[in-house]
Amino acid sequence: MESAGLFDLQVNGYAGVDFNDAALTADALDHALHAMLQAGVTQCLPTLITATEANLHARFEALDGAVARSRLGPLMVPGYHLEGPFLSPEPGFHGCHPREAMVLPDVSLLERMTRDLKRPVKLLTLAAERSGAETVIRWAASHGMLVAIGHSDARAEVVARAVAAGARMSTHLGNGLPATLPKLDNTLMAQLGEDRLTAGFIADGVHVPVPALRAMLRAKGWERSVLVTDAVAGAAAPPGRYGFAGMAIDVAADGTVRNEAGTLAGSALRLDRAVRNLVEWGICDLAQAVALAADNPGRLLGQELIGRVQWGETGEVRECRLDEMAVRAA
């Protein structure tokens, strides 16, 4: 089977490289992107998470400069994903994001962080219930950003208002939530039941148990679902300790990634592995799984897919071709 290249909308780092590092270089970025090609990924949105304005500015400057100076960045990185700092600081909802750096949604702050970028922020994740969120959603959507709800306690009425303002996606649905929620009147059900939202899912068997993932995919529907990795530097790298946005994170032998507080902190998932997982778990066939990782994110972002991937019968990447460069899977 052949398909277009995969498109990862949420990737914090890869192959030992942290995209949230203010010292990120073009060589390091090329190393990570080349490793992503081995997983069939030809486009991605490097993701910056919650930090102070000064830190976000420094990290954006380093990332944007690395993309411009790298060999693969201009081809594979159409823009960025900003996940925060407009998230919920409430226990359970903030995940591994630093609560002390979270602020209320603010158009002027968002404009200051993005106005000098050579490549745009393509995806913005925020908590829809926070004061000022609807104003930021309208501004971001009018400036070409895909706006997603994530790390949020927005119930049905607030979700509906956010969608009316221009939100169109749920970031890693099922995660960024406390262990205990109201039984039915909660943000997970509200977003799952909102047909105008497309949901991103981390299909690693850790972030969402397989039976729950199967149920949520059925409820959301194939056309309104995408696969993401939320990968950190420990993806496509040996188990051990890595850096992530100023945190120390540990990648276990089973691929679970946690910070020193024991909180999940991204994943070590490869996007081709997510595709293969859906097939091996009996959730869908290979063509459907590939569509969730290529066609659907491309259509959602309005981005033309690039590259070609040759797939084996069991869902392994045999070759990924980007323009005239072919990369065989390791």
Image (cartoon, rainbow, N blue to C red):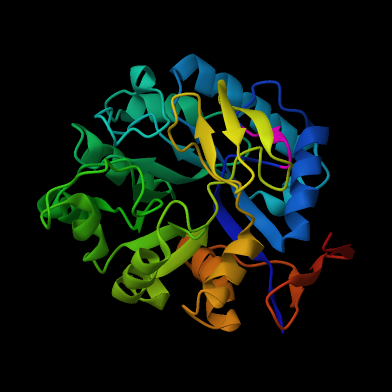
Asked if residue 85 is positioned above or below residue 123 in the image, the reply reads above
The residue at the point 33 percent across, 58 percent down is 168
**Is residue 104 at all visible to an observer of this figure?**
yes
Quarter that holds the C terminus: bottom right
Q: Residue at the location (66% across, 56% down)? A: 43
Residue 242 lies in quadrant: top right
In this orientation, which residue lies closer to the viewer: 264 or 229?
264
Q: What is the quadrant of the N terminus in the image?
A: bottom right
Query: Which residue is at the front of the view, 267 or 20?
Result: 267
Q: Position of residue 140 (x, y in %)?
A: 37, 43
* x then y, percent, for residue 274: 57, 63
Question: Taking the image as drawn, is residue 291 in sight?
Answer: no
Looking at the rendering, the stretch of residues picked out in magenta corresponds to 15-19
Q: Is residue 100 positioned above or below 287 on the image?
A: above
The answer to which image quadrant residue 22 occupies is top right
User: Does the magenta portion include 67?
Assistant: no
Q: Main secondary structure of the magenta part?
A: loop
Seen from the viewer's position, the closer of residues 114 and 13 is: 13
Query: Residue at image x 43%, y 31%?
Result: 96
* x, y percent for residue 108: 35, 25
- Front in this rendered view, residue 151 or 298: 151
Horizontally, residue 289 falls left or right of residue 139, namely right
Query: Could you tell me residue 280's position as x and y percent?
Result: 57, 75
